[in-house]
Amino acid sequence: MAESYRNIVILTGAGISAESGLATFRSSNGLWNNHRVEDVASVEGFERNPELVHDFYNNLKTEIQTARPNAAHLAITRLQREYPAAVSVITQNVDTLHEKAGSKEVWHIHGQINQAVCLNCSRIMESWSDVTTETACPHCSVSGMMKPNIVFFGENLLYMDKVDRLLAECDLFISIGTSGVVYPAAAFVQIAKAHGAETWEFTLEPTSNNYYFDHHIYGPAGKTFPPFVDSLIKEAETR
Ligand code: BV8
């Protein structure tokens, strides 16, 4: 661990929300909440059966709404508040547990469950209520053109200009709860490392891209990440 860091980037995946009771992707043999991922999280799946996809995300909305942030989310917020550096969160998660934990600078590269995008005017509707194939866009009033603002497989990610800048400037890259299977997010550690960042991985078991990580901490992030934050803050206080 270096003496001090100036720009910290934290990439999170479904694993950080596991201790909040939300399912992860690949621990359920390729099913995503009992659905084939390609049926509910792909462009083709949405075109084939938009009602199924809307139902899937409307149900997930209800589950996510009641979920509470866990110690790992809260530790990120504490790091942002108490460590003298810029701390940004790039999340693959569509849940809003980072925001519920009080974190700022959270970039949802795979979209957000409480948003829908109008395929007619491209503007975003924020809503925790059900969105269906009948829903009218609050901006252009056209009905039936709303899509969950979720980045499906085969779609480009959101905020990639910001992500590119964050990865180029970061000197500490931390990955929490992601299996390193889904690209381009799985390549972020490689980019950060190429720019000289120290790289840490917090997960349950070795992941698909673990050779790019300098350090691996295995175990539930709610247990392993708060002590890591304690040590970073303590280090900064003794400088
Ligand atoms: C793209 C939204 C350019 C849905 C998600 C062929 C054609 C087209 C594209 C591709 C192709 N082949 C490959 C690709 C690229 C594709 C891809 O990577 N596919 C993979 C499957 C091979 N990527 C894309 O399509 C991306 N776009 O490339 O655009 C393009 C455009 C057109 C044509 C070509 C290219 C879009 C990817 C985004 C897809 N949407 N989510 C939804 O969320 O409902 S991805 C989905 O996977 C979630 O966002 C999820 O977060 C993400 C990654 O999964 P993880 O978060 O890592 O979760 P997982 O369950 O896998 O792992 C959990 C980890 O946590 C484990 O390691 C476990 O050990 C750990 N863990 C568990 N509990 C704990 C824990 N750790 C700590 N503590 C715990 N308690």
Image (cartoon, rainbow, N blue to C red):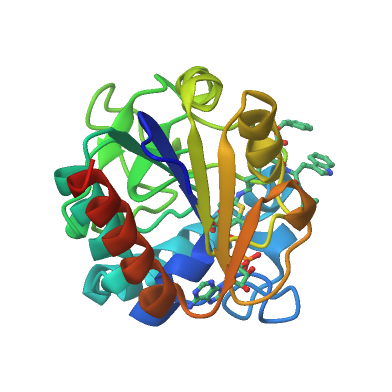
- Image quadrant holding the C terminus, namely top left
Q: How many marks?
A: 0
Q: Position of residue 201 (x, y in %)?
A: 58, 58
Q: Is residue 84 above or below residue 166?
A: below
Q: Quadrant of residue 67?
A: bottom left
Instruction: Relative to 195, say whether 186 is above or below.
Output: below
Image side of residue 116 versus residue 52, left or right? left
Q: Residue at x 22, y 31 (%)?
A: 138
**Which residue occupies the foreground of this view, 86 or 43?**
86
Q: Quadrant of residue 25?
A: bottom right
Which residue corresponds to the image point at 73% horizontal and 59% vertical from the top-left?
38
Q: Is residue 142 above or below residue 182?
A: above
- Residue 123 point in image, percent of width and height: 34, 24
Question: On the rendered structure, is 232 left or right of 93?
Answer: left
In this view of the protein, which residue sits in the foreground, 32 or 91? 91
The image shows residue 233 at horizontal and vertical percentages of: 24, 52
What residue lies at 38% left-to-right and 79% top-to-bottom? 223
Q: Is residue 21 visible?
A: no
From this view, report whether residue 173 is shown above or below residue 232.
Answer: above
Q: Is residue 239 left or right of residue 30?
A: left
Q: Of residues 177 and 192, which is closer to you in this image?
A: 192
Q: Residue at x 42, y 53 (%)?
A: 94
Q: Is residue 29 visible?
A: yes
